Image (cartoon, rainbow, N blue to C red):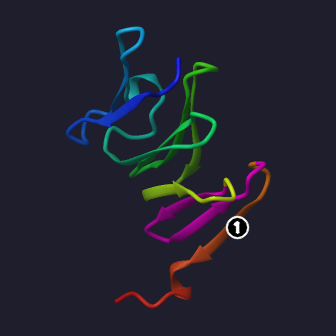
């Protein structure tokens, strides 16, 4: 199963992932591993993994491997994948940058930026 249409609900019930081809809707919430019921954002990377930002951490949902795991703890807001396949994970404390091979994590503190 590949994420064809991940959706957030009212941001307080986790997420629903819709597989239109197989007519399946899967719910992910705290009851099956999501780090928090309140979700902020979803990003689907080039491998089809769904990165979910919550108040309690970043979760990775890999439907092909049937895995749901918390990657980082913290209060995360959003994420995106750049053209070098790096994941940028934005939290209230700064930005975490995960390299393409997912072996190295860099952190840019919010103190390094001017917020306007």
Front-lying residue, 52 or 36: 52
The x and y percentages for residue 36 are 39, 40
The x and y percentages for residue 86 are 66, 57
Point 51% across, 80% down: residue: 110
Point 56% across, 87% down: residue: 112
Point 57% across, 35% down: residue: 49
Dot 1 falls on a residue whose secondary structure is strand
Front-lying residue, 42 or 35: 42
Point 57% across, 43% down: residue: 45
Identify the residue under disc 1.
Answer: 106
The x and y percentages for residue 7 are 32, 35
Q: Is residue 95 left or right of residue 37?
A: right
Is 94 inside the magenta-drawn segment? yes
Front-lying residue, 59 or 6: 6
Residue 13 falls in image quadrant: top left
Residue 74 seen by the camera? no
Residue 114 falls in image quadrant: bottom left
The residue range painted magenta reads 86-101
Establish if 30 lies above or below 42.
above
Hey, which residue is sitting farthest left in the picture? Answer: 10
Main structural element of the magenta stretch: helix, strand or loop?
Answer: strand
Is 106 inside the magenta-drawn segment? no
């Amino acid at each position: 199963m590949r994420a064809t249409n991940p959706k957030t609900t009212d941001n307080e019930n986790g997420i629903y992932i819709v597989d239109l081809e197989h007519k399946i809707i899967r719910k992910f919430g705290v009851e099956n591993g999501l780090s928090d019921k309140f979700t902020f954002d979803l990003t689907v990377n080039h491998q089809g993994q769904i990165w979910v930002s919550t108040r309690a951490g970043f979760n990775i949902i890999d439907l092909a491997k049937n895995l749901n795991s918390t990657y980082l703890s913290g209060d995360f807001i959003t994420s995106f994948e750049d053209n070098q396949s790096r994941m940028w994970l934005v939290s209230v404390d700064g930005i975490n940058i995960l390299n393409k091979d997912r072996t190295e994590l860099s952190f840019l503190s919010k103190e390094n930026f001017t917020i306007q």
